[in-house]
Amino acid sequence: MAKVLATGGMGYIGSHTVVELIKKGYEVEILDNLYNSKETVLDKIESLTGVRPKFHYVDMLDAEKVDEVFKNGNFTNVIHFAGLKAVGESVEKPLEYYKTNIDGTLNILNSMKKYGVKNIIFSSSATVYGDPHQDTCDESLPTGRELTNPYGKTKFMIEEILKDVCVADKDFSVTLLRYFNPVGNHESGLLGEDPNGIPNNLMPIIMRVAKGDIEELSVFGDDYKTRDGSCIRDYIHVVDLANGHILAMEHEKPGVSIYNLGTGTGTTVFEMINAFEKASGEKLPYKVVGRRAGDLPILTANAEKAERELGWKAEKTVEDAMRDTIKFLRG
Ligand code: WQD
């Protein structure tokens, strides 16, 4: 049975994936520096699964401590979630993003090589498509074009590093999972998106507005050529996303495999607001402001390849995500 190291496993997507891995019987350890998460997540994983995974409070930039984790871990697989992920912040702090995301990944890969760990699933992003100049993305599209921020560039660069590792080591298995817009929370309401500091993404901001931490949501533009003028995105439930990782792991083979993880369905910002209000039974205060630089009008996934090759398909809806989010918010 595989033994998995989840880097960033205390984070939003990582913790949901750890829960699903444990439920499927996998042995999991977590490496995380708690930059964007809290140690209480471990208690929630334990309460949901009955298992308290071993937690290494380690920064992936500390090569010696990363090596120590691998030396004693006997891992067969790595799922690599750890990294900085705020698009806007990456524009202000490019050096921090390149150092953390790239150097950190190189430390993980060097230890994998040293201890013969040959399988990695990388938490990539639809951002690597840049501006695809089309509404729906499939995996055959070129990447790395017109990337508008260091965050997206680090995701692209790490994908390229992993491809090169596979050229050098024919036994190495790389799976690139390109997420679209993760939303929602575990149905228990115990696990959820709760980033430290000021969030950047739509859903955690909606959650902060609903809690009263932020006065109102700013809708970045209502003059796009879409059905209601606001941008369209492919919002995928985090539990569907987690299960995509497990199926990807169970289908690992030498070489590079690339999959979009999305629903194939687009939802506008106003539709997200309406869905949240319907689930919460309360109005969500918002105002329409100017467009945000870099936003694309429409970005949705063609996720047919994951369905065809992994037998994976998103099952949950935006309504499910809103219901779970409300439950998480109300605690
Ligand atoms: C969604 C929509 C905004 C905030 C980014 C990354 C991508 C992935 C997901 C990691 C857009 C609108 C948002 C707000 C708003 N991250 N919005 N008011 O930009 O699609 O994708 O996060 O993998 O890589 O690029 O997500 O949640 O920021 O925005 O109107 O306060 O909500 O304009 O249309 P995005 P987002």
Image: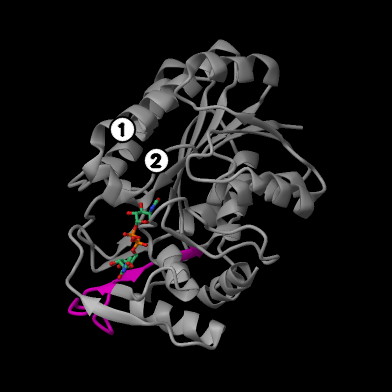
Whether residue 231 is in magenta: the answer is: yes
Disc 1: which residue = 96
Q: Position of residue 220 (x, y in %)?
A: 24, 71
Task: Look at the picture and state if 237 lies above or below 266.
Answer: above
Disc 2: which residue = 84
Task: Look at the picture and state if 35 lies above or below 212.
Answer: above
Q: Position of residue 72 (x, y in %)?
A: 69, 16
Q: Amino acid at mark 2?
A: Leu
* Quarter of the view holding residue 30: top right
Cβ–Cβ under 8 Å for marks 1 and 2: yes
Which one is nearer the viewer's eye here, 180 or 81? 81
Structural distance between the alpha carbons of marks 1 and 2: 9 Å
Magenta range is: 219-236
Q: Position of residue 312 (x, y in %)?
A: 58, 56
Whether residue 320 is in magenta: the answer is: no
Disc 2 is placed on an element classified as loop
Q: Amino acid at mark 1?
A: Glu
Q: What residue is drawn where x is 58% and y is 69%? A: 329
Relative to 13, 43 lies left or right: right
